[in-house]
Amino acid sequence: MSTRIRQELNLLMLSISFFSRLPVKKNLNYSPDKMHEAGKYVALVGWILASLLSLLYMFYSAVFPSNVAVFLLVVSSVLMTGAFHEDGLADTADGFWGGYTKERKLSIMKDSRLGTYGASALICALLGKFVLLSALAEHAFVIPALCIAYPLSRTIGISYVQDMAHVSTPHSESKSSPMAKPFRASHLSILLLTALVACLLLPFTTMLILLTICWVSRVLLKAWQNKHIDGFTGDTLGASIIINELLIYGVMLATLVGEG
């Protein structure tokens, strides 16, 4: 195996280890710079997760009723990611709605305790995912939905490093710090192309509608983050991923109903 291929596989393994709980080999070649470069494979990690979840869903749906299969799918998705992004959503909700100043909001977001706002956001997100996927299951569209939502939502989430400031509490080091700077053009191209390939699963008009709504969502979520903390944190990136994942399911469901 060439050195170049080994280097790229190492970057992919770093990305998998950061954004999921999937097992990877130990003693990966790590450095902050390598971790940052590994961000170009975030959409590919989304593809890997979606593929594994699709296989599990096919098994679940062959054995259990539809609603049970979707419930097990949601549980499996949480286990595969370690609720990494859901944790970010909960922390963001607690901080943004529980604090009155930027400093206080950031402090709350660093607190490991779950508050009322965070718990409410978490329940709504998981329940929303179950309801939307259950509705998509009625149209036999769960697997395409996963294969589109997982790469695309993760790409939207990490894209904020390109045009927003990374913020944190004083004297604290975030897990997302290595990722928190703009990507080189070549790395950004890999990220975007890997995500957009998923959209080819959709009819052209539906794809345009989905990408337009995702762009609007990105603009609004950027403004939301800047309003509260003048930038982004790892938690807000996770929140963005969850919000956009649910949004993508909703858009695809609305399109399917409209076509029906």
Image (cartoon, rainbow, N blue to C red):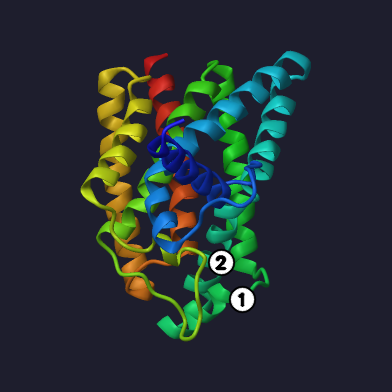
Mark 2 or mark 1: whose residue is earlier in sequence? 2
Is residue 132 found left or right of 191 in the rendered image?
A: right
Residue 103 in which image quadrant: bottom left
Query: Is label 2 in contact with label 1 (beta carbons under 8 Å)?
Result: yes
Q: Position of residue 228 (x, y in %)?
A: 38, 73
The answer, for residue 101, to whether it is visible in the render is no
Task: Name the foreground residue: 185 vs 193.
Answer: 185
Task: Name the foreground residue: 146 vs 3.
Answer: 3
Residue extending farthest left: 185
Q: Where does the C terminus fall, quadrant-wise?
A: top left
Going 59% across and 46% down the picture, which residue do you hit?
20
Q: Amino acid at mark 2?
A: Asp
Dot 2 crowding, Cα within 10 Å, few <14, some 14–19, many 20+: many
Q: Which mark is residue 111?
A: 1
Q: Position of residue 63 (x, y in %)?
A: 78, 16
Going 46% across and 86% down the picture, which residue do you hit?
170
Q: Amino acid at mark 1?
A: Asp
Q: Position of residue 190 (x, y in %)?
A: 30, 38
Residue 237 in which image quadrant: bottom left
Going 63% across and 43% down the picture, which residue do you hit?
25
Task: Name the foreground residue: 169 vs 212.
Answer: 169
Count of residue discs: 2
The answer, for residue 45, to whether it is visible in the render is yes
Q: Which mark is residue 180?
A: none
Is residue 50 found left or right of 39 in the rendered image?
A: right
Per the image, label 2 sits on a secondary structure element best described as helix
Q: Which mark is residue 91?
A: 2
Q: Is residue 33 placed above or below 102 in the rendered structure?
A: above
Q: Is residue 26 placed above or below 102 in the rendered structure?
A: above
